[in-house]
Image: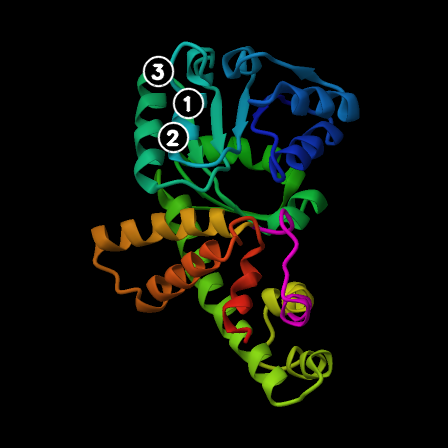
């Protein structure tokens, strides 16, 4: 069993770190709000540290799951960042959805210091984290990845290396492009069914068994129908619109660099801006349907 640290105990990190502890690994945790780290220790055991560096001391593997590029730099670099304490040969595994550029930057800095950095964003949402069934897409040194994969298996349904540093983040961008189009299509379909006077659940029961089936349909059609009927979406449930806009911003920035044409993604990003203007920044991404309500 490995000596590990986990930095960032949000809706994803909290259960992911718990799976590490249940798998028998030693786990030290850090969170910017110390109360969350103490709550994790009360539930799972292990050790709460006052800084990222102190969490990383003695760890063979340091896992990170924070919000964005700036958050990631804040917990890795500087005298209190994990890079200040990581031992030669250790592996930093970053589960943040961030830019490919910051992944390459931190991988180069880690190599300069004698350890490894793997970009490893995840897909599967809060339910995937809680059930230990995440899909993890990775970039970085092959040997370091091979060492880290059995540790990530504690909370992964599938884990795969896609290439060198940044490849994991680029794959996550593909994931978010797919989701954006699917959620908009499902929103329009359910709004159409409503206008046509059809029973939405009966429609889903049928079409979900055919070519239209998707994870979003299986897991989010109920929230969409509820929002359409009530005119309200519950906040802090699912993957927030604010975070999706952050992710799509990363995607669109990268597309401007590599020349990819993403007209639908750019349009759906603006639709999510409309949802934010409706006060829906903390609504789940399936709240796109609220734009289509009379």
Residue 123 shows which numbered tag?
Answer: none
Total count of labels: 3
Sort mark 3 into few (<14), some (14-19) or many (20+) by Cα contacts within 10 Å.
Answer: some
Q: Nearer the viewer, residue 75 or 142?
A: 75
Q: Position of residue 103 (x, y in %)?
A: 36, 35
Residue pictured at 51% horizontal, 65% vertical: 288
**Which is more N-terminal, label 1 or label 3?**
1
- Pointer 2: residues within 10 angstroms few (<14), some, or many (20+)? few
Q: Is residue 212 visible?
A: no
- Assign a secondary structure to mark 2: helix
Residue pointed to by mark 3: 113
Instruction: Please give the range of residues in magenta.
Output: 225-239
From the image, tell me which residue sits under label 2. 70
List x then y, in percent, for residue 68.
42, 36
Q: Are marks 1 and 2 in contact (CB under 8 Å)?
A: yes
Residue at 63 percent of width and 66 percent of height? 231
- Give the image location of residue 232, x and y in percent: 64, 61
Q: Quadrant of the C terminus?
A: bottom right
Mark 3 or 1: the one toward you: 1
Residue 68 vertical position relative to residue 54 in the rendered view, above or below: below
Q: CA distance from mark 3 to mark 2?
A: 21 Å
Task: Find residue 213 and report its image quarter.
Answer: bottom right
Question: What is the CA distance from the residue labelled 1 to the residue labelled 2?
Answer: 6 Å
Instruction: Check whether the beta carbons of the residues at disc 3 and disc 2 lie within 8 A of each other.
Output: no
Q: Is residue 163 part of the magenta span, yes or no?
A: no
Residue farthest to the bottom?
196
Query: Which residue lies under the disc numbered 1?
Result: 74
Frontmost of labels 3 and 2 is: 2
Q: Secondary structure at mark 1?
A: helix
Using the rendered view, name the quadrant where residue 13 is placed: top right
């Amino acid at each position: 069993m490995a000596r590990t640290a986990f930095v960032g105990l949000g809706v994803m990190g909290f259960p992911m770190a718990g799976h590490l502890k249940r798998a028998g690994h030693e786990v030290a945790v850090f969170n910017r709000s110390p109360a969350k780290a103490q709550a994790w220790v009360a539930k799972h055991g292990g050790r709460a540290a006052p800084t990222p560096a102190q969490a990383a001391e003695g760890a063979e593997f340091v896992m990170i799951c924070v919000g964005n590029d700036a958050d990631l730099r804040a917990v890795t670099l500087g005298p209190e960042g994990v890079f200040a304490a990581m031992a030669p040969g250790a592996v930093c595994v970053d589960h943040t959805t961030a830019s490919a550029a910051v992944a390459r930057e931190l991988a180069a800095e880690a190599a300069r210091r004698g350890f490894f950095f793997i970009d490893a964003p995840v897909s599967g949402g809060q339910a995937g984290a809680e059930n230990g069934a995440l899909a993890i897409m990775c970039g970085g040194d092959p040997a370091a990845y091979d060492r880290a994969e059995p540790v990530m298996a504690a909370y992964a349904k599938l884990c795969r290396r896609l290439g060198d540093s940044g490849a994991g983040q680029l794959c996550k961008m593909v994931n978010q492009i797919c989701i954006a189009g699917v959620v908009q299509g499902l929103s329009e379909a359910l709004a159409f069914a409503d206008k046509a006077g059809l029973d939405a659940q009966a429609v889903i029961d049928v079409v979900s068994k055919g070519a239209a089936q998707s994870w979003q349909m299986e897991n989010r059609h109920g929230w969409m129908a509820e929002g359409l009927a009530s005119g309200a979406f519950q906040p802090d449930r699912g993957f927030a619109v604010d975070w999706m806009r952050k992710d799509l911003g990363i995607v669109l920035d990268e597309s401007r660099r590599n020349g990819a044409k993403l007209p639908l993604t750019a349009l759906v990003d603006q639709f999510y801006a409309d949802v934010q203007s409706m006060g829906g920044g903390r609504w789940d991404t399936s709240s796109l349907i609220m734009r289509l309500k009379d």
